[in-house]
Amino acid sequence: MDFKDYYAVLGVARDAGADDIKKAYRKLARKYHPDVSKEKDAEARMKEVNEAYAVLSDPEKRVAYDQLGSGFRPGQDFQPPPDWDAGFEFSGARSGGFSQADAAEFSDFFEQLFGRMGGRQAGARSRGHQMQGEDHHAKVVLDIDDAFTGAARQITLRVPRVDDTGHVVLESRTLNVQIPKGVRAGQMIRLAGQGAPGFAGGPAGDLYLEVQFQAHPDFRVDGRDVHRTLPVAPWEAALGAVIAVGVPGGGQVKVRIPEGAQSGRQLRVRGKGIPGDPPGDLLLHIQVVLPRADSERARELYETMSRDLAFDPRATGTV
């Protein structure tokens, strides 16, 4: 996917204020709008201009785009890293797709970055009447251990706003959050009253935290199930064994390796995944690991096996 320089599309500097961006958009709209333009590529150019303006005129999308795209050139191969938007506080109750009617006309680049962010959901305002504030949402990335034990965490969110000069700035706020035991990836944690302020004395909106998990060197989460590669020694696989296996949260479970187990075999330990009703399972993927023949004694043992076992793994005819 090619990187798009939205500032270049509108012909403005990266530190341009909101008024400069609006003026540049209006100028280009007069030039490329298909109803009035004589340019051959007017429709395509107008789509590019609309897309650039949709991002740069929105403080939330602009500040996220600026942080993500720093150092990239137009047309350069680009892939957003996983959870690139974690820690940003956005308007709207939750992610779920850009709300503008013409979003389908925007590029894959836009969809990859902002397709799940959602558009601004302006709440109704009625003079003289109290109105609840708008809900907000943010993605937070937690340790898998938190899902097994629950936890109290301090979470810092970055909140974009437009200052008095029309420039977008980032402010931060830190919240104390109780992570419930059994929380799943994609689940929303609701913080009542932590969204936008209310109108005319009305109550504040809520803040919804969308949970994702940090990549873990040992575990992979799929819903409530937890997967782990389980290294076993050749004699454990051949003869069978009972071994202790670590699980997220610091505990251990004892697992029986069946006699004759091969690499790739899956063992299921029911109820040892993420807690819930019902809980998930722990799925162990066996990987037989050979000791190195890096000593005289080790080589002797391998040579003995070679002579006495007369084993040919290719004799099945599958290789």
Image (cartoon, rainbow, N blue to C red):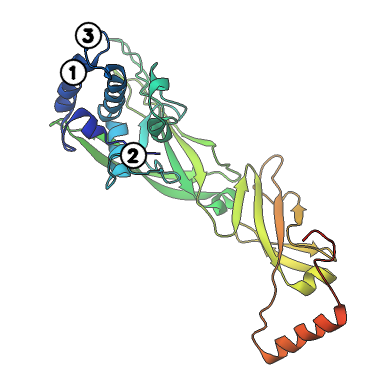
Indicate which label's residue lies in the foreground, 1 or 3. 3
Q: CA distance from mark 2 to mark 3?
A: 29 Å
The quadrant of the image that shows the N terminus is: top left
CB-based contact (under 8 Å), mark 2 and mark 3: no
> Above or below — where is 23 with respect to 260?
above
Q: Residue at x 27, y 12 (%)?
A: 34
Residue pictured at 45% horizontal, 29% vertical: 94
Q: Could you say whether the residue bearing mark 1 is in a helix, strand or loop?
A: helix
Residue that appears at 55% across and 59% down: 217
Q: Position of residue 196 (x, y in %)?
A: 34, 28
- The residue that disc 1 covers is 26
Q: Quadrant of residue 112?
A: top left
Which mark is drawn over residue 36?
A: 3
> Dividing the image into 4 quarters, which one contains the C terminus?
bottom right
Q: Residue at x 76, y 72 (%)?
A: 234
Where is residue 32? Give x, y as percent: 23, 17
From mark 2 to mark 1, how far is it between C-alphas? 24 Å
For residue 257, side relative to residue 88 (left or right): right
Q: Residues within 10 Å of mark 3 (few under 14, many from 20)?
A: few
Q: 232 or 39: nearer the eye?
A: 39
Left or right: where 203 falls relative to 311 = left
- Dot 2: element: loop
